[in-house]
Amino acid sequence: MYNCLFFAIHIFIFFINYNLMQYLSLFDSFGSSIQIRGYKGQTQQKSTIGGLTTVVVYSLSFCYLIYVLVLWQAGDIGPSVARYNEVLNYTIYESGDQSLFDFTFFTSESEIDPFSDQNIVLIPLLVYYVEGVQTEPVNLLKYKIRSKFGSILIKTKNLTLILNNQPFGQKQQDAQIYIVDCQQKYLDSNQTCASQEIIDKFKQQSNHIFYFNTIQTYNTRLKEMQTVQKKQYLAFDYESSYNLYMQLNSANLNVEDGLLFQNLNFYKYIDDISFISQVQTKEFNLKSVGFNFYFCFVLSLSPLVYQVDVRYQNLGEIFAMVGSIASILMSVGILMEQFNSFYQDNILIYKILQQYFPNKITINRIGQITDIKGLQDNKQIKKLSELAESKLNILNIIYQISRMELFLLHKFGRSELSLANDFIIQTDQFEESHELNSLDAKKFYIEDMEIFANDNIS
């Protein structure tokens, strides 16, 4: 930018040094048109109706601008949203403090909660499968909280899921959550498994496991991410095991907002989850994973990723939108231009005929001649109007001026007429006489110019 400024300064100095300033006017892009002034110095024919229409159109445009700005400020003008799918071969998702999958057994005060600290019946274990290799199980009871219903809720935080369908990069990593019988080797020192009596009592209950999948969505009106939990439940059966495969569809969101200039924000979140379920026998579990379980929840990333682009309208685009509506309203101006042109022609015809019929012409509100005293035939009035209109032709005006020039040459001769070039305005108002006795006079007084500067010819 500074280089452009220095270049412009050098160009300006160059024009000064070589006396080229007089030619700069040739490059002026902001010149005004030279116009012939009409009645009372106007360069355009204007009318009361046209003025009223202009006020109404501009008032409507301004009110619409205020209306749109209020909607824009309140977020009621929706952004443009482009959503498309993309298949990725490699991506990583880290949940951080946000729990992707929560589960609990809804129990009453009289019923046994299998995740109770001192009487643990069931234990949830987190196992990562990295390229088919199982990691050491992690006890998820340390992430438990008390739900709003009073039962113990297990949350799964700090999960890392990796999708890799290519030979390089980090290895494919899925998370699997098993719910198995309590075993002391998985517990902390302050935790104990329940007695057989409590386990038998738990088996006699009607047990259901409720699980919650956490997904997110972007609220375009509030301009913020919102969390949604999907709730489902499964019946608990001691004689069988239940597999639930959950494929997480992630999304990459680009939000472009800003008052005048671009402001980009990026979000990565889980947009949707697809489920595949299967019931298996305990014998099959022992063969496949080496231990028995009641529930297995598998979390993996889908290669299908949603790309979402949200673009909010900035202030310039709001003005452009209002301008497009205003331009439609301004199309009324075409009719007003036609009316003003029609009205101008009528007034000019009236002014011309006034020279021949002073104080005898009657016109209507749009300037049309309705009556001329002494003329009863409308055909004569129409004929006179057509003749007066012909005088407005530029060729007719030039013709009349040339006729006047020839008349003056014939009447006074070239030598006498050339004295007109020497006529001046006399500024001495105290001179004894300023009567024009002959064309030899070379001085006029200011009041003599009033004869030729009457702007109210009637």
Image: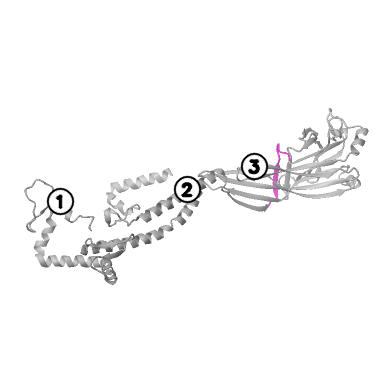
Mark 2, secondary structure of its residue:
helix
Residue at the top extreme?
190
Out of 294 and 380, give the one closest to the viewer. Answer: 380
Mark 3, secondary structure of its residue:
strand
Which amino acid type is marked by label 1?
Answer: Glu
> Which residue is disc 2 drawn over?
63
Which amino acid type is marked by label 3?
Answer: Met
Q: Which residue corresponds to the image point at 19% horizontal and 66% vertical from the top-left?
A: 402
> Which residue is disc 1 drawn over?
447
> Which residue is disc 3 drawn over?
225
Report whether residue 256 is seen. Answer: yes
User: In the rendered structure, are the residues bearing label 3 and label 2 in contact, judged by CB atoms less than 8 Å apart?
Assistant: no
Q: Which residue corresponds to the image point at 84% horizontal and 43% vertical from the top-left?
A: 295
Quadrant assignment for the C terminus = bottom left
Measured as percent of width and height from the top left, residue 352 is found at 24, 63
Query: As displayed, is residue 374 above or below residue 142?
Result: below
Measured as percent of width and height from the top left, residue 248 is found at 73, 47
Which amino acid type is marked by label 2?
Answer: Cys
Mark 1, secondary structure of its residue:
helix
Q: Is residue 96 magenta?
A: yes
- Mark 3 Cα shell of 10 Å, populated few (<14), some (14-19), many (≥20): few
Q: Which residues are magenta?
A: 87-99
Measured as percent of width and height from the top left, residue 70 is found at 52, 44
